[in-house]
Amino acid sequence: MIENFFGIIKSELFYLKKDHEIDELKRDIKNYIEYYNNDRIKLNLKGMSPIKYRAHHIDN
């Protein structure tokens, strides 16, 4: 599962911007993880973000 996440973050973040300063890269990764968990929809999670999907199943 984590290997899949790293593949996604590389293709959606790292490879799109070649010249990263280390502090900028850290900030971008932190922001991407926030986006991935809260806003990025996944079809295999019924079109919900991971946090929304978990909240939906906890409530039901």
Image (cartoon, rainbow, N blue to C red):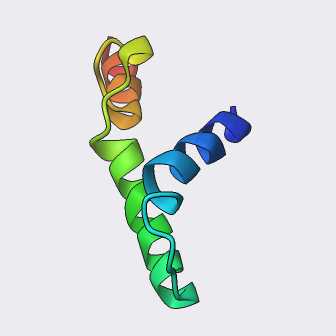
Instruction: Specify the quadrant that holds the N terminus.
Output: top right
User: In which quarter of the view is residue 40 placed?
Assistant: top left
Locate residue 28 relative to residue 4 in the image: left or right: left
Locate residue 51 relative to residue 11 in the image: left or right: left
* Residue plotted at (43% across, 71% down): 28
User: In which quarter of the view is residue 57 placed?
Assistant: top left
x, y (%) of residue 11? Answer: 52, 47
x, y (%) of residue 37? Answer: 40, 44
Q: Is residue 31 above or below residue 8?
A: below
Instruction: Specify the quadrant that holds the C terminus.
Output: top left
Locate residue 6 relative to residue 33 in the image: left or right: right
Depth order, front residue of 41/18: 18
Locate residue 26 relative to residue 3 in the image: left or right: left
x, y (%) of residue 8? Answer: 54, 41
Q: Is residue 45 above or below residue 13?
A: above
* Residue plotted at (33% across, 32% down): 49
* Residue plotted at (38% across, 56% down): 34
x, y (%) of residue 59? Answer: 31, 19
Q: Is residue 12 above or below residue 27?
A: above
Q: Tally the marks.
A: 0
* Residue plotted at (49% across, 66% down): 29
Q: Is residue 12 above or below residue 30?
A: above
Depth order, front residue of 56/3: 3
